[in-house]
Image (tube, rainbow, N blue to C red):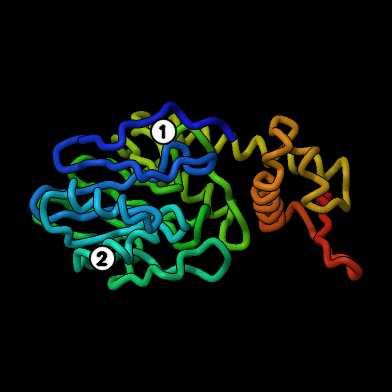
């Protein structure tokens, strides 16, 4: 994991018809805070209203300066979608996105009025947003292509200045890398992430992420080869020597995602201990 960039302006006009408000939820995981985007000037769509912070919702309504007709989310993690229900209640807006999957750290309060499949669009007079299904960080993750600008609003699929945690069972490393390659092939002008600043060189940014993940995968495979039969917890110090011990708990999530990808690729095998139930991993020679 790498550090986020410097603090951001709380409110920015990014281009005509596209504005950004940074939610007041900065942390190690969210960087400066969750980016909330506003599209349009007469009929407004809001993307990722963030956590259910009343002051932030009030700020969104005030900054919109026009009726908010749609609220979209990229995925249902607690730093992106809980504000949607509150914002829709205040404005009567239609909720768009995909329902929360099962599991922890999912916002079960998000119930979309319209479920978006890959390629479906929100068409307004001033803009068109096309949903691009990008599973990996979350199985229900959507990016949104802003047709006029050819900018892709990436949520947590690609963020600025840091990598994201892939947390099984809902997170899937193989799907994540496949979706990154698909996004790269779109040829977007820029990426507007859920955390951090606009990414002006999408191909370079995506290539770096893919390379980073594949290098880490090689380290995982090498560690399992040298230390067969270890659990993910036991493997973390061997794989993440470049990460401080305070981050081991987070690193273990992505480590398990790498191991599952190696298993899906037919390169690794796990067995469950009859006594403890721990998963122990070996490479397939």
Question: As drawn, which residue projects farthest toward the top?
Answer: 6
Side of 162 where 18 appears, left or right: left
Task: For the N terminus, give its image quadrant.
Answer: top right
Identify the residue at image location x=28%, y=54%: 57
Q: Position of residue 209 (x, y in %)?
A: 53, 36
Side of 191 where 42 appears, left or right: left
Q: Dividing the picture into quarters, in which one does residue 235 lie? A: top right
The residue beneath circle 2 is 88
Identify the residue at image location x=45%, y=70%: 108
Side of 43 where 57 appears, left or right: right
Q: Is residue 132 in view from this perspective?
A: no
The residue beneath circle 1 is 203
Side of 123 where 256 appears, left or right: right
For mark 2, give the secondary structure: helix
Q: Dividing the picture into quarters, in which one does residue 195 lie? A: top left
Q: How many marks?
A: 2
In the image, residue 233 above or below residue 72: above
Identify the residue at image location x=43%, y=26%: 6
Q: Position of residue 53 (x, y in %)?
A: 36, 54
């Amino acid at each position: 994991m790498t550090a986020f960039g410097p603090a951001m302006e709380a409110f920015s006009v990014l281009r005509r018809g596209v504005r950004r408000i940074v939610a007041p939820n900065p942390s190690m995981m969210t960087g400066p805070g969750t980016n909330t985007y506003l599209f349009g000037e007469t009929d407004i769509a809001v993307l990722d209203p963030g956590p259910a912070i009343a002051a932030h919702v009030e700020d969104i309504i005030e900054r919109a300066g026009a009726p908010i007709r749609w609220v979209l989310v990229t995925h249902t993690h607690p730093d992106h979608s809980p504000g949607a229900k509150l914002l829709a209640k205040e404005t009567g807006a239609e909720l768009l996105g995909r329902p929360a999957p099962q599991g922890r750290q999912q916002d079960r309060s998000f119930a979309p009025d319209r479920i978006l499949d890959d390629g479906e669009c929100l068409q307004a007079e001033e803009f068109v947003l096309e949903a691009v299904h990008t599973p990996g960080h979350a199985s229900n993750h959507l990016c949104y292509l802003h047709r006029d600008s050819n900018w892709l609003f990436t949520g947590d699929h690609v963020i600025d200045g840091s990598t994201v945690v892939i947390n099984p069972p809902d997170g899937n490393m193989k799907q994540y890398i496949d979706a990154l390659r698909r996004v790269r092939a779109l040829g977007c002008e820029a990426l507007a992430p859920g955390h951090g600043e606009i990414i002006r060189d999408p191909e370079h940014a995506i290539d770096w992420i893919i390379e980073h993940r594949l290098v880490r995968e090689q380290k995982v495979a090498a560690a399992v080869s040298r230390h067969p039969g270890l659990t993910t917890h036991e493997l973390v110090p061997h794989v993440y020597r470049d990460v401080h011990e305070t981050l081991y708990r987070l690193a273990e999530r992505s480590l398990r995602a790498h191991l599952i990808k190696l298993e899906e690729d037919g390169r690794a095998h796990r067995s469950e201990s009859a006594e403890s139930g721990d998963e122990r991993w070996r490479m397939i020679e």
